[in-house]
Amino acid sequence: MIYFLLSLLCSVMVSVFMRASEKHIRNNLTMLACNYAACTVLAAAFARTLNLFPRAEGIGVTLFLGLISGILFLGAFVLLQWNIRQNGVSLPSTFMKLGVVVPTLMAITLFGETPTFVQIAGIVMVIIAIILIQSGKSQDKAVNYGALIALLLVGGAASVMTKVYDFYGVEALKNHFLFYNFGVAFLLCVMLCLWKKQGLGLMDALFGFLIGVPNYLSSLFLLLSLETVPAVVAYPTSSVGSIVLVLICGRLFFKERLTRRQLWCIGLILVALVLLNL
């Protein structure tokens, strides 16, 4: 459980640093590339070997899953940005969070995890809370539901890759998996930066590396936690737990007011967290 809590804490740090970067960065793709660069370097360091492509049992699976995961990671970000242009801010944020449904359902159908009735009730409450906490925001654009569903599926698929590797991969190569994952995302992101002709500013790089450290640790700790915490509990708990902590951090550090709707949703989320972990 300690690894899961550390993963949750690092995930919240990523959100806080991204919120803090809004007024300082000029190129969001460049910041993202620096984030992936930091993650890649850390994964290489944690692998504790200069041979990042060893001839070891399971390396083929590790490389393949890392490649797919890296593509999905960056694909989810690109789809999020595209959805914001197509559908405004509120609906993409909601559907991105609802992507938690994908790894939860896959944990049940593919990995054979069976939630209790109480945990099912908690999962339903998680989905309701995510919808309610985002639905109070105004929507002034025509809705492209195809783009939103694509975001939900790709974002959810990116999340589930950690569990896929935990199930099919080799435990000793977990840092190699993360290296391939973030390395592929970094290379693809650099290609996007060149295509979009985004430069590299000092603050872009600074916040990118600042975000990259907790981003890598969040993925590592989640991978470690899935060895003991069922995915059907870990993913919904992580999703709504991070929502609550980010809202609290927004109030403490950025003086953002919590609306009555958000307070009610926090209460609903806390009940859901209790049910999920019974």
Image (tube, helix red, strand yellow):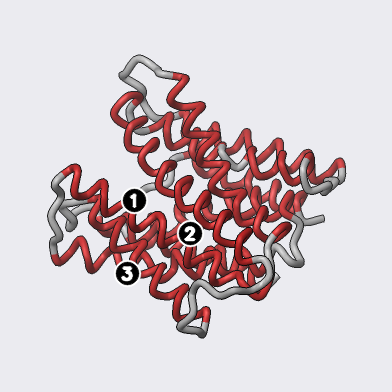
SS class, disc 2? helix
- Location of the C terminus (image quadrant): bottom right
| Type of the residue with mark 2 | Asn
- Location of the N terminus (image quadrant): bottom right
Picture coordinates of residue 52, whole percent (x, y): 48, 74
Question: In whole angstroms, how far apart are the C-alphas of marks 3 and 2?
Answer: 19 Å
Q: In this view of the protein, can residue 215 be seen by the observer?
A: yes
Residue position marked by numbered label 2 in the rendering? 181
Q: Quadrant of residue 125?
A: top right
| Type of the residue with mark 1 | Leu
Who's the residue at 37% across and 47% down the image?
257
Picture coordinates of residue 189, whole percent (x, y): 31, 51
* Camera-side mark, 1 or 3: 1
Question: In whole angstroms, how far apart are the C-alphas of marks 1 and 3?
Answer: 20 Å
Nearest the viewer among 122 and 168 is: 168
Q: Residue 223 got which mark?
A: none
Picture coordinates of residue 156, whole percent (x, y): 57, 41
Residue position marked by numbered label 3 in the rendering? 210
SS class, disc 1? helix
Q: Residue 188 got which mark?
A: 1
